[in-house]
Image (tube, helix red, strand yellow):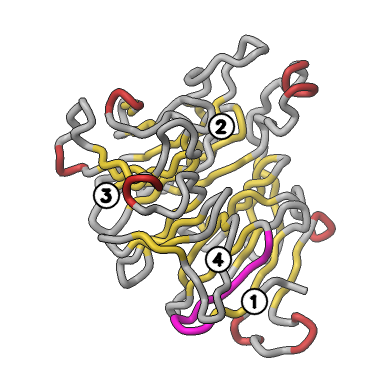
Amino acid sequence: MWFGSNGEGVNRYDPAAEGGTGGKSFTQLTEDDGLCNNKVCTIMEDDKGNLWFGTAKGLCRYDRKTFTTIAIPQSDTSSVWLDKVYPTVNPNQVMSLLQDKRGDFWIGTNGAGVYHYDGKNFTQYLSNVGKVYEDGLKHNVVLSITEDLMGNIWFTSLSHARVSRYDGKIFTHYKTEDGLSDNFVRTSFCDRAGNIWIGTHGNRDGGLDRYDPASGGGKGGQTFTNFRKTDDGIAQNNIGCIFEDKSGNLWLGSGRGNMAIFDGKNFKEFITKDGQKFKIILNIVEDANGNIWFGGKYGLWKYDGDEVTDMTPK
């Protein structure tokens, strides 16, 4: 298991060493080991077993022995607006990664849209969509990239560029007029049935949206079902991450509220036997043994279906 951090590199967890003292089951890798930056926003394994790390200073690949920096195209960051007004936007920061079924790579950035990488060349997409900011430019932030069962690639936008679907030839953009609850979108996920789940930032009327491909892609909200805290019992309208476990339950992390579960009918907050709740969960995943791992601002935990164990590296 691999875990990124907000400034301390990556941690590799070895289950074979579980139970060892002094945190020996975790191995930390940082810039001192060749990692291109210690702020790691996303991690992906490719079809050859290499690990890719998206960081605050670009992209690097790890073949389990050596880190190699992959130089992505660089955007101008000299804007006064970027430096003074909104310094958290760095268009050269890699926020999301996907290798599609053809083997090509998609790289979502923190302000420069998306790059398609075929192993040799980069092609930029979705950089000129969304809101025009105070500096007169568009800074499209793409926090998630998802491939659906039909091979379409979905891109979310945290800069009001809605949700975009690429079928290999053209981009189709879905917005509030099409049934999306908000154009300010954080994450997406494709479930086993082929539905696309969209998590918004939770502003205005935003919440959790489900796109049903069986409805034919019609307009007027025919393809989207919206879930909101006030109407449907969802724990929080801000959805930061989505994951479906082997039992078909949907796990929902939030940047504002507590983690919740959707069983297909009802939403409920995830609460341990002793009443513990988990706030600001940014990533959720299931391991090969069926354990659910979730982590965020306040730590890392493992849930075995009965007990929750604090796994935060010490």
The C terminus lies in which quarter of the figure? bottom right
Q: In the rendered structure, which segment of residues is drawn in magenta?
A: 298-307
Q: Looking at the image, tell me whether mark 4 or mark 3 is earlier in sequence order.
A: 3
Q: Nearer the viewer, residue 18 or 253?
A: 253
The residue singled out by tag 3 in the image is 195
Q: Nearer the viewer, residue 205 or 101?
A: 205
Residue pictured at 52% horizontal, 33% vertical? 158
Amino acid carrying label 3: it is Asn
Q: Residue furthest front?
A: 230
CA distance for labels 3 and 2: 23 Å
Left or right for 301, reference 117: right
The residue singled out by tag 4 in the image is 294
Q: Nearer the viewer, residue 142 or 308?
A: 308
Amino acid carrying label 4: it is Phe
Q: Could you tell me which secondary element the residue under label 3 belongs to?
A: loop
Is residue 305 on the magenta stretch? yes
Tell me if label 1 and label 2 are in contact, CB under 8 Å: no
Tell me if label 3 and label 1 are in contact, CB under 8 Å: no
Q: Could you tell me which secondary element the residue under label 2 belongs to?
A: strand
Label drawn at residue 141: 2
